[in-house]
Amino acid sequence: MELLPMLLLFGLLGLMMYFMSRKQRRAQEQQQALQNSLAVGDQVMTTSGLYGTVTDVDDDSKIGVEIAPGVETVWLRAAVREKVAEDLDEEAEELEELSDSNSIDDRDTDAKLDDVVVDTKDAEPSLESGKQK
């Protein structure tokens, strides 16, 4: 009878370990499938957060990634974290349009400043000749 709780505890522990390793194995398989499916022209993000475009996939363990126009670097396939959606360029364009529409026109600013009237008759300065009252 004293052996039964111990067996249940080890059984529960073994079951938890099995499910955790299964989840980890599935994630590794998905990552491996992603790395094997890389093709020239894919937009990718590396594990260090660098974005680029795949330019060379001839080697089984390395790929070429263009990180800026004319700047190609060589990476291990394992360093690729994910493929980046093509929507990234569209989002950048939308942000640019938004910032353009929110910019203040100098003519509008001058007109608004002309409308501002400051009445200084009633204002009392808190500092007079550098001394406090």
Image (cartoon, rainbow, N blue to C red):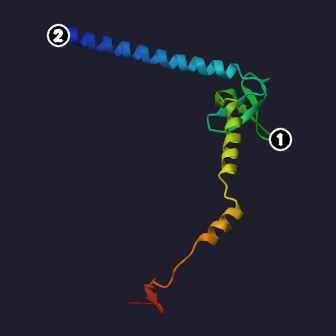
Give the numbered dot on residue 2.
2
Q: Residue at x 61, y 70 (%)?
A: 115
97 in relation to 1, above or below = below
| Residue nearest the viewer, comparing 91 with 2 | 91
Residue 59 position, x and y percent, is 77, 24
Circle 1 residue: 70
Quarter in which the N terminus is drawn: top left
Q: Secondary structure at mark 1?
A: loop
- Which of the two discs, 1 and 2, labels the residue nearer the N terminus? 2
Q: Residue at x 70, y 45 (%)?
A: 97
How many marks overall? 2
Residue 92 position, x and y percent, is 69, 41
Q: Amino acid at mark 2?
A: Glu
Quarter in which the C terminus is drawn: bottom left
Q: Amino acid at mark 1?
A: Gly
Q: Nearer the viewer, mark 1 or mark 2?
A: 1
